[in-house]
Image (tube, helix red, strand yellow):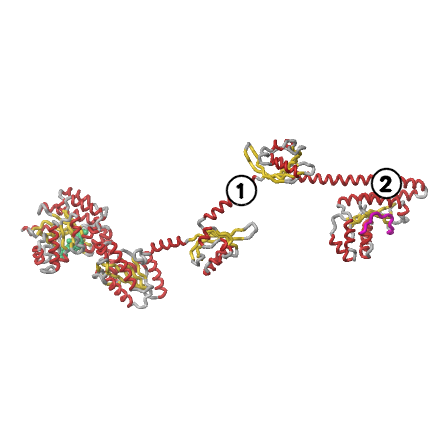
Amino acid sequence: MLDTTKKRIKFSELVDVASLQALMDSFNQVIGIANAIIDVDGIVITSSGWQDVCVKYHRVNPTTCGRCIASDTSLVESMLNGAPFAVYGCLNGLVDTAAPIVVDGQHVANVFTGQFFTAPPDLDFFRRQAQEFGFDENGYLEAVDKVPVIPGERVEAITQFYANFARVLATNGLDRLRHHDAENRLALLNRELTQRVQERTAELLEKNLQLLRDEEVLRESQSTLTALFESMSSGAVVYRASADGQDFVVASVNRAAERIENMRRKNLVGKNVVEIFPGIEEFGLLDVFKRVWQSGEPEQVPVAFYQDGRISGWRENYVYKLPSGELVSIYDDVTEKLQAEQELRWSEERFRSMFEMSPLGMILNSMDGRFVEANSASLDMLGYSLDELNKMSYWDITPLEYKEEEAQQLESLSRFSRYGPYEKEYINREGIRFPVRLNGVLITASDGEKFIWSIVENITEKKKSEELIWRQANFDTLTGLPNRRMFRDRLEQEIKKAHRANLPMALMFIDLDKFKEVNDTLGHDMGDILLVEAARRIVECVRESDTVARIGGDEFTVILSELEDAASIDRIAQSIIGKLAAPFLLAEDKIFISASLGITLYPNDATVIDSLLKNADQAMYAAKARGRNRYSYFTPALQQAAEARMRLTNDLRGALENNQFKVYFQPIVDLGSNSIHKAEALIRWEHPVRGLVSPAEFIPLAEETGMIVEIGDWVFREAARQAKRLREMHHPDFQISVNKSPIQFCNNDSPYQSWFGYLQELGLPGQSISIEITEGLLMDATPHVYDKLGAFHDAGIQVSLDDFGTGYSSLSYLKKFDIDYLKIDQAFVRNLSKDTDDMALCEAIIVMAHKLGLKVIAEGVETREQEELLAAAGCDYIQGYLISRPVPPEEFEALLMQRLR
Ligand SMILES: Nc1nc2c(ncn2[C@@H]2O[C@H](COP(=O)(O)O[C@H]3[C@@H](O)[C@H](n4cnc5c(=O)[nH]c(N)nc54)O[C@@H]3COP(=O)(O)O)[C@@H](O)[C@H]2O)c(=O)[nH]1
């Protein structure tokens, strides 16, 4: 605490002001900062080194001078609280310090220092001050420039020094105060002594301070350098060069070098560079050292380093020469960097070749659609050069109608960073559109710009083959009409349309009558021409909106959609029948065929596809049954008949095991001897509800279901047993003919081999049985059929060609196969009379057969006249109601007995 009760002490009376001024001047010179001692009344006791900035400028202008005073006052005030010193940033931008001189408890004066900066000055601030207070700017800035910059820690040391000095002055002052009067001389001596001490102190102080400053700077820079050297991540080795600059010995190494070399410092220091780094000469590093040492110019060189005699990595060396003449090599292990660079180059190379060689187009677009990159495949595809493309936008090659879809893809791109795959079209240089399939991802460049990277597949060929496959799958290759599959699709669509429009729709089934004959007689090529022409004629009869399809060999369908006029169905049906009945010109032949057409209506007859198909089929068969070359509508009766057929088929399945079948026999009379040594076995079905069912009705069902094989086998065995009986009872050469369906021939499961065994079992020769086949079988004869017929022949079983004259009546078959009998169909016999065509035909058949060594059996002989005419024509055998209807075995036997009588 300051003592304010005592008599006020004047500081100027306690000191020798001149000596003090000299001391303060010395301080100013040594420390380089202005100082002053001002007593509490503001009287300046000493003042040293105050510079122009204050003296010529700040203290001259009233405002800046006021600021100086305010600064001083503020400093002095801060002394009042007993602080040993204070530092103050003056309002004019400089720093001041003050230390109080307190003598005998009274604050009598202050030691001021000032006019320095703790950091380089903000010249703009002083420029503004010059302008504001009208200073000569250049002079003022020059004055500012002379103001020393003292780092903060030094300011503290200096201030501490002045604070101590203030305390010395105070103590000295107190002594003076106490001995002022009594010891004037002593005081004088003392003053002299003090002066000397002070001079010496100042001298020492100056030296010390200078030493301190130098040491500190040195220590600081050394420790900074060492820290830098050690903390470097790069290896650093300092080399001392030999006098001739040819040898370099390690002087020091940093920690990174130790780590990289995997050697302790002590093992490195003192070694010659060639000892430590094998290969240094090979890679030219030693030459670099020499050059740098000579020229002083730094150089950079990559050098490989070895491990176990092999290059294990690479370093990048930067070699510098220090002012001391030493060399510094700073180096980094760049193996990974080089490897990464190499990997990058390799991956870029791979990418580039993939990019260029890829058969797929690869395109890089900016987000606004500009073309940035495009590979050869995409350039080829589009027909543009890269330069041209670079000036274009994605939208230049995109048809307008894809805009909406493109927007969706862009949305996907922004949400999921990818888009596609999706298909669209591009427009090439010629303006031609072509289909492409696109996939893309969003990529971000190193500068953050986003791009769209697209893979483009030209799918023109794919589309073509898809179209081809689709056409092949859906269209008939011969006529170009929709096939069965497409027809079903269309029918389904038309049903829906008709339902929506509430209009009827008609479905027609057309079967070409006698097409098979054309095919077989004129060949398949002609058959094909006929089918194409028939298709064309049918198409001609309908509207474009209707569908004509080919669903099988000679089967066509027509869908007449959304019919507003039901009468048009008849017109169209009639027109089709008429056009197909017109002659077809095939090569030089004029061919006549006809068509049977069945019609069903939606929704009247049925509403579902399968029912409509079944109906039209039934109607078509009805037309056929009614004599062909006509059309027939589906009726419920047809439906009933079909259902009846279905029921009969079901019943047929149990007929054999329920013993519902019987074999009847019809005699065949030898016209030469009027005797009966032959008979035809004809099956009968005694249906438990319907009674006797004609084979004409159930044999086709048995054939359709394959049951004919089992049934035929049963008939054969019955016939064989009966033949054995008749041979024993009636005539040793008795022969029974058995009808053999083509289905039996073609079926591999047919047990015909076992028949031979069965005949043997019964002790019968093959001649006891004859099989009746139709021409159709021979026409489609496969090697299998040949083999079977050959096997029958070898077994002695004879063959009759049934229904001769109704089919192809081809002589070539008769020669080709071993046929024994021709059976003239009852159709020719039925109306037989003198000089009729049928008579002529029968005569011709008989003559021809005889010429070929075949016997002739005439079927369906019902009258004596027919018998006589046939006999006169040389027919060998007759069979028919004239002799007997087919009868059960016992009746047949009775008949034979009766004839004997
Ligand atoms: N695969 C098999 N087919 C068989 C078998 N049994 C018979 N059939 C075939 O069924 C069709 C009808 O036979 P069916 O009703 O027995 O008629 C035969 C005779 O009854 C009939 N016929 C004989 N003479 C006359 C006659 O004077 N007038 C007249 N209106 N009809 C007569 O002809 C049929 C014999 O024909 P075909 O066989 O062509 O000699 C018929 O196609 C049989 O073939 C069997 O077991 N298996």
Total marks in image: 2
Residue 104 occupies which quadrant of the picture? Answer: top right
Q: Residues within 10 Å of mark 2 (few under 14, many from 20)?
A: some
Residue at horizontal 39 percent and vertical 54 percent from the top:
463
Q: Is residue 112 left or right of residue 871?
A: right
Q: Identify which residue, 31 or 146, lies in the foreground.
A: 146
Q: Position of residue 88 (x, y in %)?
A: 78, 50
Q: Is residue 645 left or right of residue 130?
A: left
Q: Nearer the viewer, mark 1 or mark 2?
A: 1
Location of mark 2 (residue): 199
Q: CA distance from mark 1 to mark 2?
A: 73 Å
Instruction: Inspect the image, locate mark 1, and give the three-letter code of the amino acid beneath it.
Output: Gln
Q: Identify which residue, 736 or 116, lies in the foreground.
A: 116
Q: Earlier in the sequence, mark 1 or mark 2?
A: 2
Q: Is 580 a magenta residue? A: no
Residue 207 occupies which quadrant of the picture? Answer: top right
Q: Position of residue 640 (x, y in %)?
A: 25, 60
Q: Is residue 657 visible?
A: no
Q: From which residue to which does the magenta span run?
A: 41-52
